[in-house]
Image: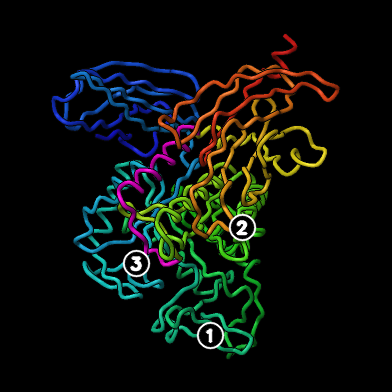
């Protein structure tokens, strides 16, 4: 049995369809319930047709919201419950959930990758190493090999691009900003970058680094290649990759060498790419890779659709994840933040430890209001920077991570509420009394052996995310983790400025993703009004949100 949306994302006012798969003539009734946060917004009953059935829910007029769906099946004295989620938005670029595909042989034409990504609500897909050459992206041949020797079928790439669009995804073409083959370099040596020893920069002895300065012939060339990818292959945008180096370089050695700072040039490259690819009313997606968080300070504000950071050492602790996201949000002026944080434990450690690391890292990133590039192909996860060497998940593992993505979409408007400010480091600890965990060791920055309590707030809402690191002996996000020790009877005290309308909690770790109301008590003191409540248990990830009446309502 299975339940999932027909598309990865729906536009405001668009009809929402779900797909229900059941055994034929097994169930007599299906009761469909749709929730927005803690509110029931739709309920309908029908007789299941068996096999693959379409559940039509109608349209939703919210400009930005996530919805949870529960289908209760009954028949023959048996009951089963299936859950999924969907989101509705009037601006698709506001909520980008990034995945990848990298297999493009004729045998991969229908390998289930797009259907798997649809079930995980991935709405933007990077087509990794799909091209003929990094300096000549589109091949005229049906079958070819890329610069790493990988076999590719042009028809398979085109078919996957079409399928992605059918399912509501935005197919994005990988295209490094400055990589060229040896043959291209030898024909255009004056287009390249050189180091301080006046030798060309070469990455893994394959990719020659070209000069991306404004006015350089290479810049015109690569933007032209991007245009071909959009026009000839049908891609919806470009993933502008970098390798993290060089950060400074020199122009051609036969001329008077000019010293170049790439952090000055890359923002203008993004601007020029946006301007030239947007001619004629086009609105392509642009994602630029800030490798190791460089140079986010100069590129984040450029006209791209997200702040994308590939996370490497020394950003190896959970606290670094929080810092990267906060800094990127500030630099990007509210853009979506996407972290590509690859999990090597799937290659080097026992799978249950790797899965715990994946769940913890996903919880940490989403709780901070960002998204994670991790999932791709058919039930695969990324473990390193070369995406074609992914790790395949077992069916149970894939189902568990899929449930986490159902959870983040269901509570989308909490996690990605632009009005929420992260206050974990300033409103907890020492003599800060605004948020306190009363009986369980808690941390504001992801310490091992403690509950990580992430606090975000605005006037009428407070959001607490608890990521359970109890039982962990280190705080490195890229190391396998034991099963967290469940924390029971967690008592929390929160200062509030306005009367509370309700307190609610939800978790992806229990039998249901549905929100539950939390009983609370109110205490008035010389420091203001406080609410105190108890959580029956925190397994790995649990959220709590407090809804309050705003100032205007108080005046009335």
Which residue occupies the foreground of this view, 146 or 36? 36
**x, y (%) of residue 299?**
61, 58
Q: Is residue 200 above or below residue 351?
A: below
Dot 2 lies on which element? loop
Q: Is residue 521 left or right of residue 537?
A: right
Dot 3 lies on which element? loop
Point out the residue furthest to the left here.
Answer: 25
Residue 406 within the segment the image draws in magenta:
yes
Mark 3 or mark 2, whichever is nearer to me? 2
**x, y (%) of residue 53?**
21, 29
Tell me which segment is drawn in magenta: 385-411
- Residue 301 in view (yes/no): no
> Would you call the spot at circle 3 few (<14 residues within 10 Å), some (14-19), or many (20 or more)?
many
Q: Is residue 521 above or below residue 292?
A: above
Q: Which residue is located at x 32 percent, y 70 percent?
A: 132
What distance separates the C-alpha of mark 3 from that of mark 1?
23 Å
Which residue occupies the foreground of this view, 443 or 240? 443
Q: Which mark is residue 131?
A: 3
Q: Is residue 58 above or below residue 87?
A: above
What distance separates the C-alpha of mark 2 from that of mark 1?
35 Å
**x, y (%) of residue 437?**
68, 35
Point out the residue furthest to the top here.
Answer: 556
Q: Quadrant of the C terminus?
A: top right
Q: Which residue is located at x 34 percent, y 57 percent?
A: 101
Q: Earlier in the sequence, mark 3 or mark 1?
A: 3
Residue with the mark numbered 1? 200
Residue with the mark numbered 2? 317
What distance separates the C-alpha of mark 3 from that of mark 2?
35 Å
| Quarter where residue 438 is shown | top right
């Amino acid at each position: 049995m299975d339940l999932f949306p027909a598309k990865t994302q729906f536009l405001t006012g668009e009809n929402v369809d779900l797909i229900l798969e059941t055994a034929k003539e097994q169930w007599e009734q299906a009761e469909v319930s749709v929730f927005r946060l803690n509110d029931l917004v739709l309920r309908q009953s029908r007789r299941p047709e068996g096999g693959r059935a379409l559940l039509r829910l109608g349209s939703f007029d919210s400009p930005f919201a996530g919805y949870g769906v529960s289908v209760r099946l009954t028949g023959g004295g048996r009951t089963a419950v299936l859950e999924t989620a969907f989101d509705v938005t009037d601006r698709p670029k506001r909520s980008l959930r990034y995945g990848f595909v990298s297999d493009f042989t004729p045998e991969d034409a229908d390998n289930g990758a797009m259907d798997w990504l649809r079930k995980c609500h991935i709405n933007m897909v990077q087509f990794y190493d799909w091209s003929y050459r990094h300096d000549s992206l589109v091949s005229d041949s049906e079958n070819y090999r890329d610069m790493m020797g990988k076999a590719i079928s042009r028809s398979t790439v085109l078919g996957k691009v079409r399928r992605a669009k059918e399912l509501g995804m935005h197919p994005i073409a990988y295209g490094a900003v400055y990589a060229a083959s040896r043959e291209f370099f030898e024909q255009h040596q004056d287009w390249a970058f050189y180091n301080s020893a006046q030798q060309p920069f070469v990455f893994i002895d394959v990719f020659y680094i070209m000069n991306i300065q404004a006015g350089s012939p290479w810049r015109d060339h690569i933007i032209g290649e991007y245009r071909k990818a959009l026009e000839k292959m049908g891609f919806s945008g470009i993933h502008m990759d970098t390798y993290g180096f060089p950060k400074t370089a020199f122009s051609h050695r036969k001329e008077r060498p000019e010293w170049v700072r790439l952090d000055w040039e890359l923002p203008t490259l993004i601007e020029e790419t946006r301007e030239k690819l947007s001619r004629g009313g086009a609105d392509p997606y642009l994602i630029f890779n800030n490798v190791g968080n460089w140079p986010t300070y100069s590129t984040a504000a450029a006209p791209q659709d997200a702040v994308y950071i590939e996370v490497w050492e020394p950003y190896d602790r959970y606290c670094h994840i929080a810092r990267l996201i906060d800094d990127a949000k500030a630099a990007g002026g509210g853009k979506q933040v996407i972290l590509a944080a690859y999990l090597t434990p799937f290659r080097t450690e026992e799978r249950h430890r790797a899965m715990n690391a994946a769940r913890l890292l996903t919880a940490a990133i989403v709780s901070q209001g960002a998204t994670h590039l991790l999932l791709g192909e058919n039930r695969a996860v990324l473990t390193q920077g070369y995406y074609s060497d992914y790790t395949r998940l077992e069916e149970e593992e894939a189902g568990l991570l899929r449930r986490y993505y159902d959870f983040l979409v269901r509570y989308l408007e909490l996690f990605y509420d632009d009005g929420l400010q992260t206050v974990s480091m300033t409103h907890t600890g020492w003599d800060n009394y605004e948020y306190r965990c009363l009986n369980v060791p808690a941390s504001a920055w992801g310490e091992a052996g403690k509950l990580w309590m992430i606090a975000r707030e605005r006037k009428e809402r407070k959001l607490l995310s608890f990521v359970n690191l109890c039982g962990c002996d280190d705080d490195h996000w890229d190391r396998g983790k034991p099963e967290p020790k469940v924390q029971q009877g967690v008592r929390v005290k929160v200062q509030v400025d306005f009367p509370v309308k309700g307190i609610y909690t939800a978790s992806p770790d229990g039998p249901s993703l549905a929100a539950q109301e939390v009983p609370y008590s109110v205490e008035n003191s010389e420091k203001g009004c406080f609410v105190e409540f108890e959580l029956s248990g925190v397994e790995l990830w649990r959220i709590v949100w407090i809804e309050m009446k705003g100032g205007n309502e108080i005046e009335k």
